[in-house]
Amino acid sequence: MMEFATLRIWRGLDAKAGRWETYEVPFEPGQSVLDGLRWIRINRDPSLAIRYSCINANACKECMIELDGKTVYACTARLQQGEMTLAPLSNKKLVRDLVTEIAPPAERFAKS
Amino acid sequence: MRAETDVLVIGSGAAGMYAAIEAAGEGASVLLAERSLIGRGGATVMAQMTVAVALGAETPDHWSHHYQDTIAAGRGLCNEPLAQLLCEDGPECIRAMDDWGVGWARKDGRITQAMAPGHDRPRCVYVDFLSTGPAVSKTLRTVLNKNAGIRKAGDLCIVELLLTDGAVTGAVALHLGSGAPVILSAKSTVLATGGLTRLYRRNSASANMGGDGYALALRAGASLVDMEFVQFFPIGHLAPRLIGMDPIMWDPFRYKLGGRLLNNRMEEFTQRYGVAEDGKYVITRDLGSYAILKEVEAGRGSPHGGAYLSFQHCSATSLREAFGPVIDRLAANGIDLTKMPVEVAPIAHYHMGGIAADPQMRTDLPGLFAAGEAVGGANGANRLSGNAITEALVFGRRAGRSAASHAKRTRAMPGRADNVHTALALTAASSNRELNTAEIVQTLQATMQDYVGPLRSHAGLVHALDTIAQLTRELGDSPPNDGGRFDMRRIDWFDLRNMLLVARSVSEAALARVETRGAHQREDYPQLAPDWALNQFVRLRDDRVVLSAATSQVGAAVAS
């Protein structure tokens, strides 16, 4: 049975000047928030920025975001009916939309 | 932005990390570049359980036995020198990992070795259920971090290899965190970018594995080999929806408890295809995929289009004994194995083909090396279970050594590369077309799954090639570019440029091979043809994919 979640997502390149965008996302019970974000990219807005590698295994640990104010992995948080608010990690430097700089400093590119 | 280094390693799975460690150990300066985050983006971190190696810790063993099994699994197409290297050097690398504290499972002080399909004796070491890959990755990352000679850089998407007088001299990358191009000058470059599973709708690996290394090598002028051989893992999770677990998670369950593969009449069926299982896990991957898809075709598939996998004959106690907390994670997803079967179906898992390399991991371009799954040939037409991590470690180590030695012999840092302007122009380009790149990825994945998947035919492959050509035209010559950081459509565009070229290579090679062998199964040519005991090489000439076939001693065919 198809249900709908309302994802309210923070968008922008500047942490102080972002905007909220809202998407209706169809889902089957059991699906993850990352499933919903990937659905939005394909069906609504391919520019939505999200960081992930492993999709479903919770092995890469790259898809950390804030869901209703709590830090979660988008791949293990489940889609639910009603409104869900998604924001980038507030304690990390913003890159874009839901993507933040989560790599340790020694693992980032630096000019030689 | 720019950086200089003796050795540039592209990709930070086990192969890339081991290459970096080894090259630094030989005194080279190393830059380890990763598309995602160091040690997290590739396939290694997702490896579930088994690593095949002739340690003889439990049962006497010798690398030559492992080699025999590898060759048999490869259905006559293994590059024998590469297969030998994998098996012969495996024990040393596994012991090195043990010294570095990976924590191979032990019983009475001896490393435990499990039996796996296709092996003649218990040969597979592991860390624990679902944790072998993360442990391997973490261990190598720790060693990496102790090494001052290695610089690490995540969020670097490699756009093109640099060429100076026919030699590879580094790469141009896009730094995703800033959107700026980066020139990486290097005396040696190692491609450790893994395979191409992202080309398929159902896949078991990372979203970054779209065959970048293959495309980079092809465009630089190197050859690829065995591109038609994509391994499908027969029992990837299909239903009910299960999150937080890798879809190939049922493999360890089958290793430990057997399990029964059933059709929608709740009958075991693999015996119809030549392998009776009797509750044991013995069917090889190519036959398993074939058997399941044929049952589905005959109308005997499970509701979501696969087969049932049942552990209902196992007691709750034995399930918990074997899998402890995983049973709770299954319960959180509404799955009780004592009461219900799950549905499974083939899922793209590994690529046997790849960059042609010799046992020193040299490609046919000076200065370019390959490592891990990116290397083609060692596993022939079908990979033996457990060989992927072993090959990542062994080939990574060898590539690191060769790359360092090449850098040592190269006196000066390379000057301006011949193609640096073209590559930089592409990173600066911007098309203002409204392109739904995410949708193009989805269309490509569906096409590859349905027409270049486990079962293939002439008509299907021709259809796939048409679709790929159409998507390539749609993609156009320049990327979307909004000038900002982490521009997803721009990243997708560069990914698709590689994915479409690699998809074309796989489809062309699959179309040409008019027989069924290992993972390449042609419905219109269902038999193995002895005169097809050949390896097909792929090169790019004037943007055309050109195939040539040679007898299966690939090592001899690569210029040394």
Image (spheres, rainbow, N blue to C red):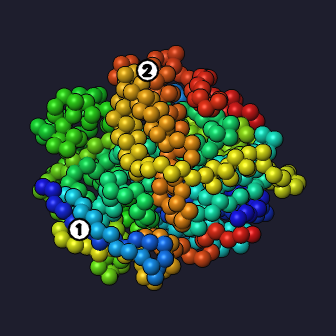
B133 shown above or below B248: below
| Cα distance between the residues tagged 1 and 2 | 50 Å
Q: What chain does badge 1 belong to?
A: A
Q: Secondary structure at mark 1?
A: strand
Relative side of B53 to A111, left or right: left
Q: What chain does badge 2 belong to?
A: B
- Count of labels shown? 2
Q: Is residue B105 visible to us here? A: no
B39 shown above or below B205: below
At 33% across and 69% down in the image, what residue appears?
A21
Residue position for label 2 = B515
Q: Residues within 10 Å of mark 1 (few under 14, many from 20)?
A: some
The foreground one among A55 and B27 is: A55
At 42% across and 65% down in the image, what residue appears?
A50
Q: Secondary structure at mark 2?
A: loop
Residue B10 coordinates in the image, percent (x, y)? 63, 55
Same subunit, tags 1 and 2? no
Outermost residue toward the right in this view: B411
The quarter of the image holding the N terminus of chain B is: bottom right
Residue position for label 1 = A6
In the figure, residue B552 lies in which quadrant?
Answer: top right
Residue A49 coordinates in the image, percent (x, y)? 43, 64
Residue B239 coordinates in the image, percent (x, y)? 22, 51
Q: Is residue B497 visible to us here? A: yes
